[in-house]
Image (cartoon, helix red, strand yellow):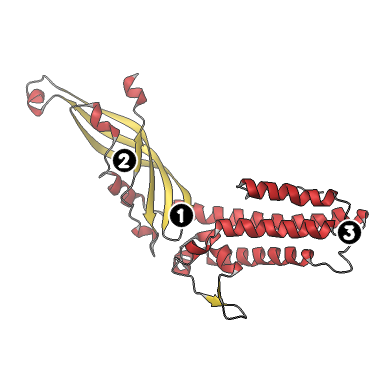
Amino acid sequence: MISLNETLLKTSFEKELCIAAFDNLKAVNKLRFNNFAYSIRELSRHILYRLAPDKDIKLCTWYKPSKNKYGDFVISRADRINYAIHGGFDNNVLSAMGLKSSIEQARKTMLDSIDDLNKYTHVNENTFDVPESEVETLADKVIGSFNGFVDVMTNIRRKVISHLEYEINHEILIATLYETYSEIDILSTHSSIENYYIDSILVDDITSQDVYFTINGTVDVRLQYGSDGDQRRDDGYVTNRSFPFKADVSAEIKTSLKKFHLNGDIHFEVDTDEYYE
């Protein structure tokens, strides 16, 4: 039997549900395959709902409420998949990044995988009381459908994040960081930031309203010991040092990544350990 891809299993409930699903295959029961298929389908549903909660989808500018056959407003599976892939970014931004067609294809593949899982949960003559010799073959098809969903979701999400990390305007981020208070102020009488260099931008999360990411880089600082008067009398000392820094920040989703501005709450850390060595 092929292995189930557990990449998207994050909560204890999801992990326990996965174990219980496979326990069904060990049972002496004419519905064991159906129960297994149903449990795996439900596992995919819980994962999708966790990745794309109702309240967050409704805040997205791209979300358009639709009605079911009973006239009730619903959030479709396609809506949930869209949010799980790209959060609040709309089609204009995705098209500008060259990702729209890739996302559309990924969404279709994931919807097809979910449809396959639904098909296997139906109880009919060819899936009821499945012979021992056929259980593993059918179970592999169920696992394959689930894995297809997980693989595509993981890959397209990674692709979106990779494009974001590449497209975000470094100059705007640096300009904002200049306004940030940091630990360097305590290193000398007068400390000033001379320059920032960004080594990497890692996107941590995309929500309906914001993008959260981590900036890693180097900051050049000027450290002055003594007053300006001390410097004129040659009683002071000035040196320039460079330190690695890390900043956990967020930015509001905009129609263009070139217009990103960091939100006010910035967790900024400068690694000054080597200064004290």
**At 31% from the left edge and 52% from the top edge, which residue is drawn?**
172
Image coordinates of residue 119 in percent, x first then y, are 77, 67
Name the residue type under label 1. Leu
- Quarter the C terminus occupies: top left
Element assignment for label 3: loop
Please determine whether, in this image, residue 111 is positioned above or below residue 273: below
Element assignment for label 1: helix
Image coordinates of residue 55 in percent, x first then y, are 48, 63
Residue position marked by numbered label 1 in the rendering: 164
Name the residue type under label 3. Lys
Please determine whether, in this image, residue 76 is positioned above or below residue 69: above
- Decide: few, some or many residues near mark 3? Use Cα within 10 Å; few <14, some 14-19, many ≥20: few
Task: Give the numbered dot on residue 30.
Answer: 3
Q: Mark 1 near mark 2, Cβ–Cβ under 8 Å?
A: no
Residue situated in front as seen by the camera: 162 or 22: 22
Name the residue type under label 2. Tyr
Q: CA distance from mark 1 to mark 2?
A: 20 Å
